[in-house]
Structures are given as C-alpha cells and as structure tokens.
Amino acid sequence: MEVSLDGWDIKRFEQTDWIPWGGTGGDARAKVLGVADGFYVALIEAQPGYRGDAHEHEYPEFLSVIDGEVRNQGQLMVQGDGYAAAPGSSHTDFGTETGATYLLVFKL
C-alpha cells in the first residue's frame, strides 16, 4: 500500500525550534508542531507568572493541559483538563502561577 504525505505537515519535535510566545508576566515559548488550513498545533511551555493577553476568538480554540496548572476564565485546570472555545467567545482570563505545559490548537 502506497502512503501519501500530500496535505500533511509533520514536524519532528527535536528538529523544531522553540519560538517566543506572546503574553505578559512570566516568559513562555512554543513549538509549532503542525499547520493545516490555517490551524496551528503548538506545544507551549509557560513559566510561573505568565498571563495571556485578552482577545476574542474568531475561530475555535482547543487546549489540553499536559503538566502544571493554568487558570482559564476563573477555572483552575490541571493535567488532563482541556477546553474548547467557540468562535465569538471572549478570552479574558488565562495564566499560570506554577508554570504549565499545554497543547493549543488555534487558527490565525
């Protein structure tokens, strides 16, 4: 069976560079692990004190906490927790006091 990679964007973790990740407070960095149809899959490492900037979601956004704790819209989220944000939703509260690693899927 022939396997095609047409339409696939497969990244190797060790060959993908970390890039700075926006926000305020503590530092954060990201590895973009794939892009398709404008959607990005990014692994983010946020240091203690990191805060995300407020924004409105034009497209759906999905997050899964891999390690640590994040506060999202007033809710404490820990390893294994996740969210799906609908288009038009306001994202006004996101941060970590402990530091966290999470997987984020979003569209620009």
Image (cartoon, helix red, strand yellow):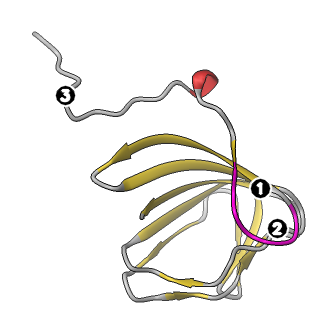
- Residue at x 19% of width, y 28% of height: 6
Where residue 75 sits: x, y (%)? 69, 83
Tell me which corner region of the image, top left, top right, bottom left or bottom right, holds residue 60: bottom left
Indicate the position of residue 27 as horizontal and vertical percent values: 84, 58
Q: Secondary structure at mark 1?
A: strand
Residue at the spot 82% in from the left edge and 67% down from the top edge: 50
Circle 1: residue type: Ala
Residue 63, how many percent across, how many down?
54, 63
- Residue plotted at (23% across, 24% down): 5
Query: Closer to the camera, 7 or 78?
Result: 7
Q: Which mark is residue 28?
A: 1
Q: Main secondary structure of the magenta part?
A: loop
Q: Earlier in the sequence, mark 1 or mark 3?
A: 3
Q: Using a 10 Å C-alpha cutoff, classify the residue at mark 3 as few (fewer than 14 neighbours), some (14 to 19) or many (20 or more).
A: few
Tell me the amino acid under the disc marked 3: Asp
Distance, label 3 to label 2, CA atoms, is: 37 Å
Q: Determine which residue is flagged by label 3.
A: 6
Label 1 to label 3: alpha-carbon separation:
32 Å
Q: Secondary structure at mark 2?
A: loop
- Look at the image and give the residue range highlighted in magenta: 20-26
Q: Amino acid at mark 2?
A: Tyr
Residue 85 against residue 13 in the figure, above or below: below
Q: Which mark is residue 105?
A: none
Are dots 2 and 1 in contact, CB under 8 Å? yes
Magenta stretch holds residue 23:
yes
Give the residue drawn at x 40%, y 29%.
10
SS for tag 3?
loop
